[in-house]
Image: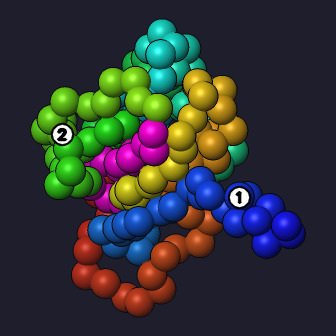
Amino acid sequence: MILLLALASCANPTVITHVYYDHSEIIDVFRYAAGGRDFLVEIRGNPTTAPKATFDGAVLAAMHGRHGGPPAKFTTVPSDQARKNYRIVFVFGPAEYAGERAACAGADGDPSSPTSGRVTMQAAFCHKERPLSSSRVKFGPISGPFDSLLAQAVGQATLSLVPYANPDYKQQNNPILIS
């Protein structure tokens, strides 16, 4: 009986299946792009039956405090103070082989409609059409936009995009993008 309960608690884990970093200075780039200002978040798809605005609000709420770097005001409608070339993109139900480059370029196919099964989410921190970091996450099923599994998945994805420590301490020849 105890074994069955233990297995049941692990039946629907949140799994990050892919993490990508363009270079090790991701925290510095995020600090420049988001520190103390509005930061654009694009949310494509909605795996729930809730209105899109409600779903988007739940995603934004799950992001707050779940990243390394300075505080940022994540929003889908940034003010003029936002750095226009930077954004985080979440694609719910991306095409099977669409990855971080497709997410940043907006070429990710037709994102998901409501689903009763597991959800796949592609997340990317983008500079223009270039992915600076990304993760692919599988989770669910979820009951709606306020399901704790959605909040957990978005929080883990956000932390994987902008971790507390540089993911790679090796010296690399990749420049920090500031524009």
Question: Where's residue 15, x and y in %?
Answer: 51, 61
- Give the structural element (helix, strand or loop) at label 2: loop
From mark 2 to mark 1, how far is it between C-alphas?
A: 34 Å
| Residue 155 is a magenta residue | no
Residue 87 position (above or below residue 130): above
Residue 59 position (above or below residue 137): above
Question: Where's residue 122, x and y in %?
Answer: 35, 48
Residue lying farthest bottom? 170
Residue highlighted by disc 2: 108
- Give the structural element (helix, strand or loop) at label 1: helix
Q: Residue at x 33, y 24 (%)?
A: 113
Residue highlighted by disc 1: 8
The segment highlighted magenta reads 117-133
**Which quadrant of the view contains residue 7?**
bottom right
Amino acid found under the numbered disc labelled 1? Ala
**Which quadrant of the view contains residue 154?**
top right
